[in-house]
Structure formats: structure tokens, C-alpha cells
Amino acid sequence: MRGYSTLQGLLRSGSANDVVWDDVNISLVPPITGAAAPTVAAINSDPYLSTYQFTGTGIVPDQLSSSMELLHSYRQGSNIIPHVHWAPTTTDVGDVKWQLRYMWINRDGVMENGTTITVTATTSGTAWREERTNLPTIAGTDKEIGSRFIFTLFRDPADASDTYAQPVALTDFGIHFEKDTIGSRGVFTK
């Protein structure tokens, strides 16, 4: 309940007329890029629901690129935890190695070379069972609201650690982050 009481205190700290800011962005980084784009396929044969499927065989990694902005409620300087929501497409059991190449820069920052982190997850043995897998925590030292997180998520079926020889369905990529306000007092300042 500590988190709840902290949020109550934050909400009470200003008057009812105080305004806070937050931000919603739509990425303009091309949604499908890289050596090979994942295929778009039906979820469990449903013709009205689609997902990206990352292949389990071959020598060319499937890649998906995008970007996001850290919201105004982000506790500046705190760490983030990237994660994927996905599902095996068969009852086979094996390891899926998710790889994330990213660059995290503050507003007006200089874009530099990225960093790659990885995680290996074992499939459940149940086809189309939703899985959530955390990648390693990323340090947020000196990061601010409005900072840009630019990334490419990929699966390399030629990697010896990736032993699941079937496609996996990727439904979401997300970042868990700490909040210390419901928004920011200024458009660009906490």
C-alpha cells in the first residue's frame, strides 16, 4: 500500500486547479526494417487478428524497429525494464533468444551507437500461450522526461542459444518505469 499512499500524497500536493503535462507520441521510425522483416500472420488461425511472427529457422534475423518517448510521469534518473509479450506457435519446447538493440538519449541529445541486451526464455509447450519476458534492466542515470528510446527488437534463428525452431508471435514491446508524479508542471520540465 506504500505506493498507493505515495500517489495519494502526490495528488494532494497541488490544488484542484493545478495543471500537469504528459505526452503521447507516435513513432515515425519505420515499423519494419532490418535484414528481414517478421511476417504478419493470423493469431491462432483467426483471420481477424494479426501479429508479427519471428521465424525460428534460417540465417537472417527478423527485426522490428521503433521508438518511444519517456512520459512526463517518469521518475527522472530511474531505471527501466524492457519486456516483450509473445507466444509460441506450436507445442514444441525450446529456447527463444530475444535481442534488443537500443539508444536512449535525452531531449536535444546526440544520437550515438546502440547497445545490445539479450534474454533467453523457454517456451511453455502450449501453443499460443501468452508469455511475458523481461530483458535486463537498463540504467536511467541522468535520463529525463521526454528522453527518446530508439530500438530494434530481433530474433536470430542462427544463434545457437535460440533452439525453438518455430515462429513465435510478438504482440507487444513495452517498458516498465517508475513514476513520481502524474505529469510534469511544465511542458519540458518536471
Image (spheres, rainbow, N blue to C red):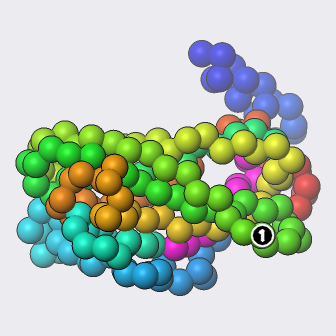
Q: Tell me which amino acid carries mark 1.
A: Glu
Q: Position of residue 105 (x, y in %)?
A: 78, 62
The N terminus sits in image quarter: top right
- Residue 139 left/right relative to 153: right
Q: Which range is magenta?
A: 65-75
Q: Which residue is mark 1?
A: 112
Q: Is residue 116 magenta?
A: no
Q: Quadrant of residue 121?
A: top left
Asked if residue 40 lies left or right of residue 183, the reply is left
Residue 162 x %, y %: 30, 53
Give how far across and how far down residue 168 sits, in percent: 25, 60
Residue furthest out toward the top: 1
Residue drawn where x is 53% and y is 84% of the image: 30
State the residue in front, 55 or 74: 55
> Can residue 22 be seen?
no
- Left or right: residue 72 compared with residue 121: right
Q: In the image, what residue occupies the spot 50% across and 45% down?
A: 135
Quarter of image, res 189 = bottom right
Q: Note whether 41 is above or below 184 in the view shown.
A: below
Residue at 32%, 65% in the rendered image: 158
Taking depth in this image into account, of 20 and 80 the one nearest to the observer is 80
Q: Secondary structure at mark 1?
A: loop
Estimate how packed mark 1 is, as few (under 14), some (14 to 19) or many (20 or more) residues with alpha carbons within 10 Å.
few
